[in-house]
Amino acid sequence: MNEINTWKRNGWLLGAFLLGAGSLSAQEASPSLNSGDTAWMITATVLVLFMTLPGLALFYGGLVRSKNVLSVLMQCFSVACLASLVWVAVGYSLAFSGGNDWIGNLDKAFLKGVGVDSLSGEIPESVFIMFQMTFAIITPGLIVGALVERMKFSAVLLFSALWLIVVYAPAVHWVWASEGLMFKWGAFDLAGGIVVHATAGVSALVLAKMLGTRTGFPNKLQPPHNPGMVMIGASMLWVGWFGFNAGSQLAANGSAGMTMLVTHLSAATASLTWAVVERLKTGKSGLVGVVTGMVAGMATITPASGHVGPMGAILLGFLAGVICYFMCGLIRNGLKIDDSLDVFAVHGVGGILGTLLVAFLGHESLGGVGGDFNMLAQFGVQVKSLAITIVWSLVATVAIVFVVKKVTGLRVSDEAEQNGLDFEEHGEAAYTLD
C-alpha cells in the first residue's frame, strides 16, 4: 500500500514537473513585453516627434523671409496633424499589415484589432505604431522645404495626404515589412535612407520643378531672416535624431548604443567639413552653413547607422559635408530648380550616398558592425532598391501634383507671394513692432 502511495506521489510530481516545463516552453515560445525596450521606444518616439515639432519647423522657419515664417510653421504643424490621422486610417495597415511584395493590406485600417495587450515583438504594438507615425510625420514635413513662400496651404495638405498613401506607405512596406520586396532582398536601411530621405528628396525636387521658382530666383532672393532660429531648430533635430536612428533598433541594447555613437560622429564631421568648404569657397564660414552640414551628415548616416563603425561614420560625414555642399549649388545654379531649402541636395543626396556606401563601410573588414557579407552583391541590392524607389517617387509625385492642381490649384497669386503668405494665407504676422 505504501509502495502504491509512493508511486502515485512520484507520478503526480513528475506530471506537475512536465506540466510546468510545458508551460515554461509555451511562455518562451510566445513573446512577452520587455519593459526596458518599451521605455526606450517611448522615449525614442518623443525624440522623433521633437524633430518635427519644434525642430524642423524652426529650422525651416528661420530660413525663409520674415513675411513667410508663420506659413512654414503652420505647414509643418498641420502636416504633423494630418499625417497622424492618415497613418492611423490606412498608412500603418498598408505599410505593415500582411500583403504582398509591393503593398500591405487593409486588415488593420483604423487600427482594427490593436489593443492594450497587442505586441509587436517585445514592445506594445501601440508604441510601434506611434514610433512609425513620427516617421510618417517628418517625411512629408521635409518636403515642405521645397515649396515654401509660394504654394497654397490647401495644396500642401492635399499633396501630403496623397503622398503618404501613394509614395510613403509602399516604400515602408518594401523595406521594413517582412513581406516587402526589398526586405526579402536584404536591403540595408536601418532608419530611412531609402524610405525617408530618397523618397522625400526626389519628390521635393520634382515638386519644386513643377511648382516653379519664386519671384526673383535665383538672383534676388533675400537671405534667411533669422539664422539664430535656424540654429535652434537644427540643434533640436540633432537631439531628436538619436531617437530616429537608435530607436530604429527597436531595443535598448548595444546596437542602439553604437547607432547613437556613429550618428553623432557623422553629424559633427559633416558640420565641420561644410564650414571648411564654405570658407575655402567664400572666405567665411556661416552659422546657417555649419548647421546645414550637420543635417547633411545626419541624412547620410541614417541608412548606414546600424552597420558602420565609428571610422566609417566619420568618413560618411566628411563625404556628406563636401558632396551635399556642392549639390546645393548644382541644383540652384546649374539646374535652375528652386528647391528652396535644399531638400534634395541635403536629404536626398545624403540619404542616397549613405544607402550606397553602407554596402562597403558596413563590412567588418572595413570597421563595420554588419558582419561578413558579399559587398558587391549587397551594393547591387542597394542600387536596385534605390532605383525602384526613386522612379516610383518621381512618377507618383508627378501624378499627385496634377491631381492637386486640378482640385485646389498649386500656387498662390503673384500679389499674395509679394505680400507674404503669413498674411495672405493665415491673416497673421510673425513680428509686430509697435
Image: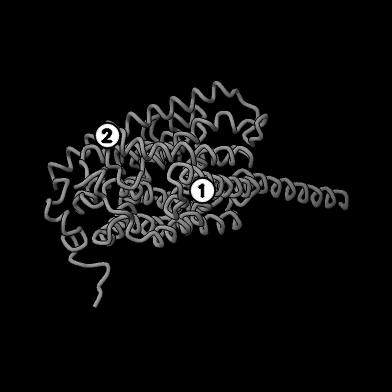
- Whichever of callouts 2 and 1 sits on the residue coming sooner in the sequence is 1
Location of residue 368 with respect to 272 vertically, above or below: above
Q: Residue furthest right?
A: 2
- Residue farthest toward the front in the current orientation of the protein: 283
- Residue 253: give x, y in percent of width and height: 64, 49
Q: Which residue is mark 1?
A: 271
Residue 231 vertical placement versus 15 (above, below) = below
Regarding mark 1 in the picture, which secondary structure is present there?
A: helix
Q: Nearer the viewer, residue 191 or 23?
A: 191
| Color style of the picture | one colour
Q: Position of residue 75 (x, y in %)?
A: 28, 56
Relative vertical location of residue 347 with respect to residue 34 in this rendering, above or below? above
Label 1 amino acid? Ser
Quadrant in the picture for residue 386: top left
Binning the other alpha carbons within 10 Å of mark 1 as few (below 14), some (14 to 19) or many (20 upward) gives many
Helix, strand or loop at label 2? It is helix
Instruction: Give the residue at x 31% y 57%.
Output: 81
Can you give x and y, in whole percent of width and height, for residue 216 in the image?
A: 21, 46
Asked if residue 433 lies left or right of residue 57, the reply is left
Write down the residue under mark 2. Answer: 396
The label nearer to you, 2 versus 1, is 1
Percent coordinates x, y for residue 166 in the rendering: 29, 38
* Residue 372 found in image quarter: top right
